[in-house]
């Protein structure tokens, strides 16, 4: 063998060895890749199994014919048949309720036709009673289906209990509503009877009271003969007491008429300053008898409202001010606010209102002076009537008071009182200044 042949043989052996090494490396690389893929596939499979096991529902795997291939149990689900009794069988081949079988097969047929999933509910009799289930059937692959089944007996019972409670609640509400309607009817009838009684009684009292006051006035004027000083003093007391009683009767009448809806405002145009001067003139004698100073701060303004009702509100407030003020002054004033209203204020330097009952002064038969040593005269209807009449005039009334430092009664009324049927968007004509 010459040298050339020898080198050629060596080169061939070297190439063969190198090829074997490369082949072995490739095989090792491929095996490693395959092992990694197998590990990843196994890990993925384990994760999928873990996810399936974590599902709280029972799972049934079926073939294209609807035969059960596999079953994954659930903690809260107990099949009515043992596993070996239903595997490799269709639902129609099992001793199950006919309605459940019909719904199951119909759902399978619809999924095979249109795809998607179907949900059904059914009942099965167990030894301990009827159990209710919900099944959601979905197509997993081209020839396999998956049914996810859970028991819904507790949910159905809760829904039934809730529906029964709702029905009972509705019956109770209906019964209570009927009771309230009946009680309201009785209350309205009682209120009408009370109003009729108070009206009749007040009218019956007014006639003899007017006679007493009238005949007393005749005697005081000496038209029935001369009276001495003592007789004049006592007759004056009788006349004052009769006047107070007549005022109380008038208050009851007014409250009854307003409460029964028989008072309606009749708007007319008038000058505010003139009205305030007339109110001061009526209250001045009583105020001067107590040594009170009367102040009037009237600004020129015209109103289109019910003059009679507004006058009654102001006179009631002024009378209250005189009644509860022992010394000092009483002021009546008015001004305009920025909203097209006129504000009337009656200020006094009297005893004020007890904070404990300040929120009750507009209630009927309440008086805001519980801290007085002696109870004031009257039924406590004055402020109630003021509040009711102010509402009829479309306004509001409020009280500001400090015990021992006086009270300010504030009445806010629109300059133009709209008729009850007028729209809120109708501004109406503006009044001249």
Image (cartoon, rainbow, N blue to C red):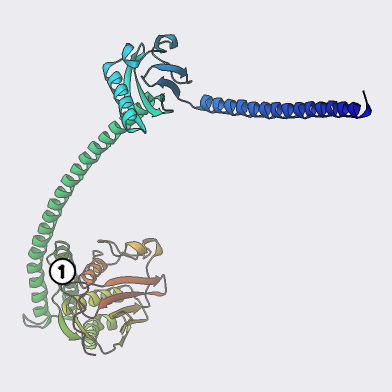
Q: Going by the image, does 390 lie left or right of 130?
A: left
Quadrant location of the C terminus in the rendered image: bottom left
Q: Residue at x 14, y 51 (%)?
A: 190
Q: Is residue 102 above or below residue 282?
A: above
State the image coordinates of residue 112 (x, y, percent, origin top left): 34, 28
Q: Nearer the viewer, residue 217 or 44?
A: 44
**Residue 231 shows in this picture:** no
The residue lying at 12 percent from left, 51 percent from top is 189
In front of the other: 34 or 424: 34
Give whichever of 335, 7 is nearer the camera: 7
Q: Which residue is mark 1?
A: 250
- Residue count near mark 1 (Cα–Cα under 10 Å), binned few <14, some 14–19, many ≥20: some
Q: Position of residue 415 (x, y in %)?
A: 23, 81
Residue at the image position 21 percent from the left and 40 percent from the top? 174
SS category of the residue bearing label 1: helix
Q: Relative to residue 27, is residue 78 drawn left or right?
A: left
Please name whichever residue, 180 or 211, is drawn nearer the observer in this view of the structure.
Answer: 180
Residue that lies at the very extreme toward the front in this rendered image: 2
Residue 166: percent from the left, percent from the top? 28, 36
The answer to whether 343 is drawn above or below residue 12 in the figure is below
The quadrant holding residue 419 is: bottom left
Residue 349 can be seen, yes or no: yes
* Residue 350 placement (x, y as % from top left): 37, 75
Quarter-of-image position of residue 281: bottom left
Vertical side of 90 occupied by 406: above or below: below
């Amino acid at each position: 063998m010459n040298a050339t042949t020898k080198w050629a043989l060596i080169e061939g052996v070297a190439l063969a060895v190198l090829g074997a090494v490369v082949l072995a490396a490739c095989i090792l690389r491929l095996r490693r890749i395959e092992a990694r893929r197998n590990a990843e596939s196994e890990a993925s499979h384990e994760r999928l199994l873990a996810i399936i096991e974590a599902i709280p529902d029972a799972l049934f795997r079926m073939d294209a014919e609807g035969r059960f291939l596999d079953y994954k149990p659930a903690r809260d689900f107990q099949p009515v048949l043992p596993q070996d009794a239903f595997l490799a069988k269709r639902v129609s081949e099992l001793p199950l309720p006919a309605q459940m079988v019909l719904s199951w097969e119909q759902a399978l047929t619809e999924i095979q036709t249109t795809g998607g999933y179907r949900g059904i509910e059914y009942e099965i009799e167990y030894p301990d009673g009827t159990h209710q289930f919900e099944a959601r059937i979905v197509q997993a692959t081209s020839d396999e289906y998956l049914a996810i089944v859970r028991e819904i007996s507790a949910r159905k019972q809760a829904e039934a209990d809730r529906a029964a409670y709702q029905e009972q609640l509705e019956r109770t509400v209906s019964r209570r509503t009927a009771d309230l309607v009946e009680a309201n009817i009785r209350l309205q009838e009682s209120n009408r009877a009370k109003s009729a009684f108070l009206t009749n009684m007040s009218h019956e009292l007014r006639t003899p009271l007017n006679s007493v006051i009238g005949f007393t006035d005749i005697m005081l004027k000496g038209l029935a003969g001369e009276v001495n000083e003592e007789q004049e003093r006592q007759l004056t007391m009788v006349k004052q007491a009769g006047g107070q009683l007549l005022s109380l009767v008038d208050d009851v009448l007014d409250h009854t008429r307003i409460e029964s809806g028989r008072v309606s405002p009749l708007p007319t145009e008038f000058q505010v300053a003139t009205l305030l001067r007339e109110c001061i003139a009526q209250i001045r004698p009583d105020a001067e008898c107590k040594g009170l100073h009367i102040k009037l701060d009237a600004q020129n303004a015209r109103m289109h409202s019910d003059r009679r009702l507004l006058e009654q509100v102001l006179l009631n407030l002024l009378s209250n001010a005189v009644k509860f003020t022992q010394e000092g002054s009483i002021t009546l004033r008015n001004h305009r606010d920025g909203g097209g209203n006129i504000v009337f204020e009656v200020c006094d330097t009297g005893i004020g209102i007890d904070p404990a009952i300040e929120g009750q002064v507009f209630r009927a038969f309440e008086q805001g002076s519980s801290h007085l040593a002696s109870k004031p005269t009257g039924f406590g209807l004055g402020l109630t009537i003021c509040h009711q009449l102010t509402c009829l005039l479309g306004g509001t009334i409020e009280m500001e008071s400090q015990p021992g430092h006086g009270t300010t009664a504030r009445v806010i009324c629109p300059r133009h009182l709209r008729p009850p049927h007028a729209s809120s968007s109708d501004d109406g004509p503006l009044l001249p200044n």
